[in-house]
Amino acid sequence: MALKRKRKREGELRLTDKKHPVLGIAATIAGIISVGVFLAACIISGRQGGNADVMVGFIGMLCLVISILGLIMAWISLHQEDIRPLFPTIGSLSNGALVIFYMILYVLGI
């Protein structure tokens, strides 16, 4: 008895029960917020000629914390079962790169 394999036709609709994890979407949003807040802090510092007060430095540290939390959320969501890995992957890559960037910026600032 020969087994026939169904070939997938182009444009064929595939139904699946996999869902985008909420933590993965939240991690991606955390990365976007972190970049946005960091750019706002850079603009504030640039307008003051680099002599911004401690609040702008606190905003930079807050961006680091947001990115670390986003990385943790992405890591947790990547280990869930029956998910689509798009948002957790985007969140982990972007937040991981941001954490490295903020740490380098912190070390160079000392």
Image (cartoon, grey):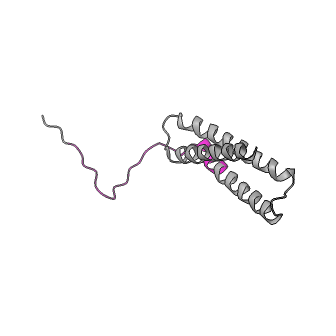
Q: Is residue 73 above or below residue 30?
A: above
Total labels: the figure holds: 0
Residue at far right of view? 53
Residue at far left of view? 1
Residue at far bottom of view? 47
Q: Splitting the image into 4 quarters, where does residue 21 fall?
A: top right
Residue 55 is left or right of residue 33, and the answer is right
Residue 63 point in image, percent of width and height = 72, 48
Q: Splitting the image into 4 quarters, where does residue 69 fall?
A: top right
Query: Which residues fall within the magenta stretch?
Result: 5-30
Residue 107 point in image, percent of width and height = 71, 42
Q: Main secondary structure of the magenta part?
A: loop
Residue 50 point in image, percent of width and height = 80, 59
Q: Residue at x 55, y 43 (%)?
A: 88
Residue 101 point in image, percent of width and height = 64, 47
Q: Nearer the viewer, residue 100 or 31?
A: 100
Q: Splitting the image into 4 quarters, where does residue 45 fall?
A: bottom right
Q: Is residue 74 above or below residue 47?
A: above
Residue 55 is left or right of residue 7, and the answer is right
Residue 59 is left or right of residue 86, and the answer is right
Q: Residue at x 72, y 44 (%)?
A: 106
Q: Does the magenta-highlighted stretch encompass residue 97? A: no
Q: Quadrant of the N terminus?
A: top left
Q: Nearer the viewer, residue 48 or 29?
A: 48
Q: Residue at x 61, y 42 (%)?
A: 23
